[in-house]
Amino acid sequence: MTAAVLAAVLGTALAGCSSTGGKRAEERAAREAAAGGRAAVNTPKWTFAMVTHSGDGDTFWDIVQSGAKQAAVKDNIRFLYAHNEEGKEQSQLVQSYIDQKVDGLIVTLAKPDAMKAVVKKARKAGIPVITVNSGSEVSKAFGALTHVGQDETIAGEAVGDELNKRGRKKALCVLHEQGNVGHEQRCDGAAKTFDGKMEKIYVEGTNMPDVQSSIEAKLQSDKGIDTVLTLGAPFADTAAKAADQAGSKAEIDTFDLNAKVAAALQDGTLGFAVDQQPYLQGYEAVDLLWLNRYNADVLGGGRPVLTGPQIITKDDAAELASYTKRGTR
């Protein structure tokens, strides 16, 4: 091999191994695989089902599904998805997948009491279960392999610390789904580390006009509130409208990230967001189930695999904007 040819070969290899070149190659391969439905493995066509506590129209779960579907393509998995915000109905959906003898289950435990028995039924039937997003504190006891998500109390504590840095004195925590233990943990965690006063308000999350009017009324009656904390990205914009209508200067902060939140962070409408990386939750859940079926692998060592929290501010939003637009952050 001549020196010139060797240099060319080495140059090509180094370019392929660079962080930019490697990232581009990975993204191109992922796009091509998704477009052609081609798997990166030759394992059997297993069926994995995900059942969440999502309500209709919640963009957060679109991002979770995006990650799960991408991993399913790579891992040669048939991916099924169902959801219901009511615990009893969610457990019935899980039972239906047990009856179908799926090869793996991914479930959320926002309402653990309603899910405990059916998760144990899945394990008794020999179906491996991974929990995501909510229920980290009971996941192991219920028999799940591991939990993928953020610790909601720790995430709330991070919010309280951030509010202290911003000099906030009185915050309103907006809970949009009654009975969701993760939401309570977020507010309680924030109250624990926040030096100011934290109040809760319960709203009907499926009725945005009601959400707006409830927040607006609270801000009008209590001018001391300088922060509104919402627990989901779709509610941040509604809270901002409520503050505007109430003539309040309260800062709006939120859990979760999407394209609208990223834009609002950039223009100053929102103060900060708490990102738990939902794409990663979906992707890792499917991938970990595949690894368990293929190689008996288990991650976490009995502890949750954490995907958050990450505090996102105006300084971070511009970098993440392109990812939110494509539905992966």
Image (cartoon, rainbow, N blue to C red):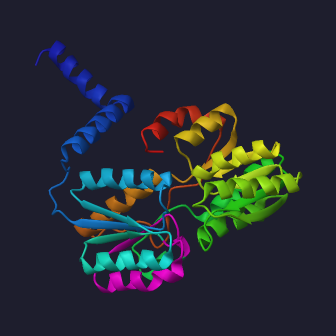
Count the labels in the image. 0
Q: Residue at x 37, y 75 (%)?
A: 93
From this view, report whether residue 194 is shown above or below residue 264.
Answer: below
Query: Where is residue 111 shown, x and y percent of the image?
Result: 54, 76
Where are the magenta residues, as a range? Answer: 109-137
Q: From the viewer's perspective, is residue 265 above or below residue 12? A: below
Res. 141 in view: no
Q: Nearer the viewer, residue 205 or 32?
A: 205
From where the camera sits, is residue 186 visible? Answer: yes
Q: Residue 286: give x, y in percent of width and height.
A: 33, 61
Rendering quarter of residue 313: top right
Q: Which of 86/154 is in front?
A: 86
Instruction: From the viewer's perspective, tell me whether residue 276 is left or right of residue 1.
Output: right
Residue 8 position within the rendered picture, expressed as x and y whole percent measured from the top left = 21, 18
**Position of the N terminus by quadrant:** top left
- The residue positioned 15% from the left and 16% from the top of the image is 5
Q: In the picture provided, is 312 more to the left or to the right than 78?
A: right
Quadrant of the rendered image containing residue 17: top left
Q: Is residue 139 above or below residue 61?
A: below
Magenta region includes residue 117: yes
Q: Is residue 99 above or below residue 38?
A: below
Q: Residue 251 appears at what percent x and percent y?
A: 76, 45
Instruction: Please name the residue shown 49% across and 76% down the image.
Output: 87
Q: Is residue 65 magenta?
A: no
The outermost residue toward the left is 1
